[in-house]
Image: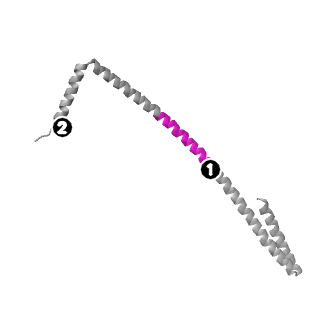
Amino acid sequence: MNRDQFEGGLRTLRGRGRTALGAVTGRPRQQIDGAVDQVAGTLQHGYGRARETADDLHRDGTEFVDGARTRGRAIAGDVRDRAEDLRRRGRGYRDEAVRRGRDVAAQADDNRGTTLLIVAAAAFATGWLMRRTR
């Protein structure tokens, strides 16, 4: 409860008292002033409630944004970690492919005759499979 709610409630009670006293004593001016105080007190109390609601919404919004920021940073960290892991794995695959390619090239260099025979057979088979048949 904030100051406006408290003061508005007091003003409403004071206005009710003035209205009742004016009715008992027969003074219409006092009744009118009491009614005005009741309305003003109710409005002030309503303003205080609206202000409190706005403060609550502001606080909740701030907490929501902070939570979203924290979750976003956690997700970004996970993405960075996964990307680094994928880069590391990709480098490993590349290095393995380069190593195996060098091994094949070295083996082909050591066995030049066999390699030439295999390449010639592969070229002949490819040509034979791609020929036109009539």
As displayed, is residue 108 above or below residue 69?
Answer: above
Q: Which residue range is magenta in the image? A: 66-86
Q: Position of residue 39 (x, y in %)?
A: 77, 72
- At x 84% / y 78%, what residue is drawn? 31
User: Which residue: 79% across, 62% down?
Assistant: 6
Task: For the C terminus, give its image quadrant.
Answer: top left
Question: Mark number for residue 23?
Answer: none
Amino acid type, label 1:
Val
Q: Which mark is residue 65?
A: 1
Q: Secondary structure at mark 2?
A: helix
Q: Residue at x 17, y 36 (%)?
A: 129
Main SS class of the magenta portion in the image = helix
Relative placement, left or right, of 87 versus 54 is left
Element at badge 1?
A: helix
| For marks 1 and 2 on the same chain, the one whose residue lies earlier in the sequence | 1
Residue most extreme to the left: 134
Q: Quadrant of the N terminus?
A: bottom right
The verdict on residue 41 being magenta is no
Tell me: residue 36, above or below residue 127.
Answer: below
Q: Which residue is labeled 2 in the image?
A: 130
* Circle 2: residue type: Met
**In the figure, residue 127 lies in which quadrant?**
top left
In percent of width and height, residue 23 lies at 85, 79
The crowding category of the residue bearing disc 2, from other C-alpha atoms within 10 Å (few below 14, some 14 to 19, many at least 20), is few
| Residue 49 placement: quadrant | bottom right
In percent of the image, x 66 and y 57: which residue is there? 57
